Amino acid sequence: MSESDQGFDIICLSHLKWEQTLFQRPQQIMRRLSQRHRIIYIANCSTRDFLRSVYKGDHKVYIGRDSPALFYVNVPYIPFTKYLPALNWIGLFIQVVVAKFMAWRLRFRDSYLWVYHPGYVKHARLLRHRKLIYDCMDLFVGFESATDETARLEQRLLRKAAIVFTGGRSLQKATEGVNPRTYCFPSGVEFDHFAKAALPETPIPEDIQSIKHPILGYFGAVDERIDYALVNYICEKRPDWSVVFLGPLINFDFPPVDQPNFHWLGRKEYALLPNYLKAFDVCLMPFVISKLTLHISPTKTPEYLSGGKPVVSTAIPDVIADYSDLVQIADSYKEFIARVDEVLRDPPADLDRRVREKAQAQSWDSIAENMERLVRELP
């Protein structure tokens, strides 16, 4: 075996827990890298989920093995972190300690440290590592919970990392010039998985079968990036439309939309998303325009399109740059409804062929392979 074929150990520190309902960039990439490398994936989970799983005896919620080479631990948040943000840094320290123990227990040597949040740089020195890799998937200073320290730590991580990957064009522009080894990898997709939405044999789940069409659907995190005023506006102006949201509530006890034609169906496993996608008539990306969303490259864009569904989005720069030929873009609430009306009357033609060509060029397999090549080429 040549040196380029040899596997290496990876310690991945992520702000997104290992789960099957929000299976996003960190999980997609680590699962693929685990085909050639041993990986420890350490992340946070809610204290409520942790305690519930302990009570039920379901240890797979917080510790487990996704494959023979991929181990994960979801560490519960410290209680009251939401009200005392300073506790978050202690929580990150605990994650690093758990990672250190796991690395010792599994005899990891000369590990590559792969991080997804700037906060981890504060404690990175506690983990012996060969190279530090930062995969930047969000502009963290844009979140409501961000502090001045978040910005300082992000700049420190960008400078310290041996290599930086960014999750989209806008993030690349926001970070370039700090680290000369910065490479852009926009969101990928498992085309064949989401293409199941177009197959006649794919069943539609019972909880969406009874909802009246047309169905305007969204799946993903229900968080601060959603323009809830827009969603309310759509529901009010088109009471004959059904708006369906799937996904976990982030910092909400219930969705901030109170309309009879709005339906939140809760968390759904990644494996079932094509089944729900099949029931959607139009897919929504109703993002609020903010400092945070101006730097996102939504993973759901290629996922929706791979299912052969028309998509309507607010004016997110990366969506415009990468998908303006496939996605309907709206600059106002009124225009958003007009765009939905348009695709309901006349769905875009030849969508499957055009999406397949794009999706094959940006599969998660291809992204992971190119990231690995760049890491191996580091001096």
Image (cartoon, grey):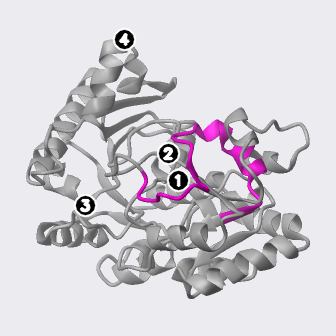
Residue in the image at 53% along x and 83% along y: 317
Q: Is residue 150 visible?
A: yes
Q: Secondary structure at mark 4?
A: loop
Circle 2 residues within 10 Å: few <14, some 14–19, many ≥20: some
Find disc 2 in the rendering and name its residue. 22
Which one is closest to the eye, mark 3 or mark 2? 2
Q: Are marks 3 and 1 in contact (CB under 8 Å)?
A: no
Q: Secondary structure at mark 1?
A: loop
Q: Which mark is residue 118?
A: 3
Which one is closest to the eye, mark 1 or mark 2? 1
Magenta-span inclusion, residue 290? no
**Percent x, y for residue 287?**
49, 71
> Residue 221 versus residue 210: which sits nearer the camera?
210
Q: Are marks 1 and 2 in contact (CB under 8 Å)?
A: yes
**Percent x, y for residue 5?**
56, 43
The span shown in magenta is 255-283
Find disc 1 in the rendering and name its residue. 220
Measured in 3D between alpha carbons, the distance from the residue under mark 1 to the one under mark 4, in whole angstroms, is: 27 Å
Q: Which mark is residue 336?
A: none
